[in-house]
Image: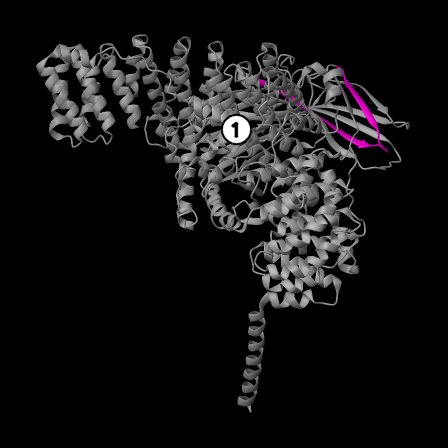
Amino acid sequence: MMNSTIQTNIARLQIMKAKVLAALRKGENYELKTELNSEYKERRKEAVRRVIANMTVGKDVSGLFTDVLKNMHTDDLEIKKLIYLYLINYAKTQPDLVILAINTFVKDAEDTNPLIRALAIRTMGCLHVEEVLDYLCDPLHKCLKDTNPYVRKTAVMCVAKVYDLSVDVAEDNGFVESVREALSDSNSMVVSNAVSALVEMNDMSPHHDVWRLDANTVGKLLTAINECIEWGQIAILETLVDYTPRDEKEAENICERLLPRLQHANGSVVLTTVRLLLKYEKHVHRADLLAQFSKKMVPPLITLLSSDPEIQYVALRNINIILQRHPKLLSKEIRVFFCRYNDPIYVKYEKLDVLVRICSERNTEPLLNELKEYAKEVDMDFVSRAVQAISRLAIRYETAAEKAIKVLLELLETRANHIVQSCMVALQDILRRYPRCFDSLVDGLCEYVDDVNEPEARAALIWILGEYSESVTNISNILTSFLESFLEEEDSGVQLALINAAVKFFLKSPQQGQTLVLKALQTATEKCANPDVRDRAYIYWRLLSADPNAARAVALAEKPAIELENVDLSPQLLEELVNELGCVSSVLQKPARLFVYSLAEKAGVPRDSGISAMGLDDADSVAAGAGDGAGSSSAGIDASNEGEPELLISF
Amino acid sequence: MTVDSLFILNTSGTPVIQKHWCDDVSIQRASLVVVPAFTKYLRSFAAMHDAEPVWSAPLDTVCIHIQRKELVYLGIVSQEIPPLEVLELLEGVDQALTEYIGLLSEVTIKENFTTVYQLLSEMVDSGCAVTTDTSVLRGLVPVPSLVNRVIENVSGIGIGTEKRPDVNTSSTPWRAQGIRHTNNEFFVDVVEKIDAIVNSNGSVVSYDVSGDIGCKSRLSGMPDLLLALNQPEVMDDVAFHPCVRINKWENEGVIGFVPPDGQFKLASFHVATDASPRTLPIYVHATTTRQDLARTIELSAEVGQCGGRPIEKVQVRVPLPAQAYNIRVQCKAGTYTVSNGRTSQVEWSMKTLKAGDRSSRLVIQYFVRQSAVTNAAAGNSSPQAVSSDQDMAQEAFVDFEVAGYSVSSIKVDSLKLMRESYKLFKGVRYITKAGSFQVRF
């Protein structure tokens, strides 16, 4: 009795399990299929929403194509839009089925509601399926002549899509001609879209002969631009970049008509206008006009710096380039570039760069005080860059050296580990630049012998000690103590510096230095594993034993004055970047041909052939590498890479 | 084509929504390679907001992104285009979504994804930004409202469809025809912001004033307004709403415009550096003392020059160093809160601060974790050693508002209505606020 109940229960459970499994197998798509065919409008609507939601998270809902299509004929605009979205997504994989939808499209393109007409024509273009082309021509003709500008502007954009699919269809049907005519449309939105479409087609056509700017068109565009909304203005401004004015008069005229664009809230309008002004002003020679352009450019650039940090960043990267063309442009505005505590780190780095660049001899003092404040911040990278900036200022302006050294000494007194390291290197640079000017401070630096634990800083201190050995009271002890850890030293730079210092000390005061130099050379030649260090020691040894005077001439020679490390771009690259001002290349500070695929092919830059074969892991590691490098590239311009574009290609 | 693809990611870098304007291969590349790489890049930063907004990503693409509250907006670009255009577009997307959906988060975006898609397809056509103006968008995409949803679900009738969206094609695309209001009102808000860095000795290191002229318009018909300012020459850089006739401003120094309906920003301006007298409405002084492990900061706030008006909504934020503990605060005026995140922060707020208030003081006292001090004192050179300077709070951020005061003394002289004959009620308010106002100790 018990047994049989249990058995029937088990049987029931098994049936249930089978049902559940079947349901799971059919999955959500099956359920959606039923819903899409429901007799209730609301359920169908919700089902369409769910289909699209699944599509957008990457689930495959292409199997529902016919069921979704059935719902296409609806008055509900939202559902219509969603289904069109679905069609765009799957049209390429199922071009035959799309033909089923054509009728609705053609009908919608004649709807009384301009929104639906535009939507239909836009979607047909986006489908990007050749099979649709034949059906698209008639509606497109009508829409290009539509009474409603919203429809016309959408149709104009659609022509570029047709052109992409088939140049012949676009040319033979006179669509391209219609777009050219649209440049004279009464509505500014249509004009600016026509410009965008023509530019796009020009880029696609092998000979760039779809459209050439002439003086007449430029005039028209400059009139239309006043009426355009921001995005239209940008489209038109960007087109003007490719235009070369015929004569000086025309260049002047264009510049003057561009000036009002500087007063726009959209940063991109402002920056593109600045780019155009910089380009056209090469053709202008009237000094008063040039001065006026420069004067007008400054305030909008400053205003960009009170925008969101992302915009500030792009502005700063570009200002950095503009300043290399017009070094004096912003010299009065130095305080605007002072860093704020809550600026993102990438903004701070750029500001530091600009600060050093625009600092004139007059305002070194406030800037040095400011840099001293930055050196107290928590971010160690930023601190070391701030300290570096101090030495750059001192190297550039002799009058600033004294104040810079004072600031560095004050910073040293904090004894914060990372500050001491950077300051020591900075001091070395300044002392190297102004030899024999600051002898008195060297003795004080010996206090920090135990604090310099970075190799670079240690080498810097040892260099200073060797160079100024006569001004240091217990030089012999200090160098001896350094020598004791000579072999533990991991960095050969420090070892070399120590040998040099010992030799210099000996040459300057032979009696005190004799034992020291012998010990140094002995350790280096006999025990040191590094061949460079050994060789250096041997050379000194032989030199000293053969001809001490020659050794003096070598070791204590007058050193050539150091220049500020080269932070400027090469003139050729600068020219290229000014032309592309405001564009990606000017922000990344490498020319477009290195990262835009089509341009690269044209320029014949050798490239990785295996781009598409690159696996996910590869790409990730490349990305991580680039991320690490980001800090160093924003420090300034990586001058070493300019001449060798090959190095940059596989970023 | 400006952008190839647009992604909205959550703060852990997972895509919430994506839209593409490129071919299939690029879509695959973007979602399989570029976005994962970008996510990795974002995560490589301790503080995500330190990630550079323009990043050159694998496969010849460039990732341009902004971070707003809980979302990351990412545009993927493969052409030589201006990144600012993408940044402005992403900003526009954020603003439009905020206006349509309200508080933005991964959840609300997913809930309203149909709206998001409709908006994106109106804002961007074949990769080019078309419009970001929400007054235009409202005509194209219906605003989802809770009420609409409920009615729709209950009755099965979508009311969103009954009101047919209209396309505004007039020569003033920002203003629809036939607007009617029973009361015709126009309000102007002149809001000025002071950005300043004040040094410990009270000297002003950097000082910058910028402002916005915000308007709220409830006017019928097609009004044409003329707004005159008392000293337009003080503004050395003005950016206007598209409705303003720039030529009129250039020639006559008055702002002529047909206003959009509702709230909008008429102009934003920057005050010429030599024109502003560098006056501070508020002075915050700090004295710091250290004794063994204890650190004390005494803050006091005082009214500066602000036309004799009281300062409102005063808020002084003092971020404390990481090694601070056992924080004690004494407060003689207003209220304070101490927040403990990765580092602690003291926030001191006062509703109003009047001239002559002597009692507004705050004393913060805290102790420094010993390990750090001994390290520094012994000159121990372990990488974590922190200088004695760095266990002291470095600065305070000050927020405030002064109603009825314009620091640049810009005033609206007159507002004239033309083309319409009704009587106009107008109001003007002036507010001076703190922008980024930093006081160093």
The three-letter code of the residue at mark 1 reads Glu
Viewer-proximal residue, B147 or B137?
B137
CA neighbours of label 1 inside 10 A, class few (<14), some (14 to 19), many (20+):
many
Displayed quadrant of residue B154:
bottom right
**Residue drawn at the location 71% of the way across and 50% of the way down:** A138
**Which segment did they paint magenta?**
B206-230
SS at badge 1: loop
Q: Quadrant of the N terminus of chain A?
A: bottom right
Q: Position of residue A183 (x, y in %)?
A: 69, 34
Q: Is residue B108 above or below residue A506?
A: below
Can residue B353 be seen from the camera position used here? yes
The outermost residue toward the bottom is A1
Please report the residue visible at 68 percent of the width from the left and 66 percent of the height from the top.
A35
- Percent coordinates x, y for residue A34 in the rendering: 67, 68
Front position in the image: B46 or A268: A268
Residue A306 is at least partly visible in this image: no
Q: Specify whether B285 is left or right of A349.
A: right
Q: Residue at x 82, y 29 (%)?
A: B186
Q: Which residue is mark 1?
A: A580
In magenta segment, residue A373:
no
Q: Main secondary structure of the magenta part?
A: strand
In this rendering, position of residue A479 left or right of residue A243? left
The picture quadrant where one finds residue B338 is top right
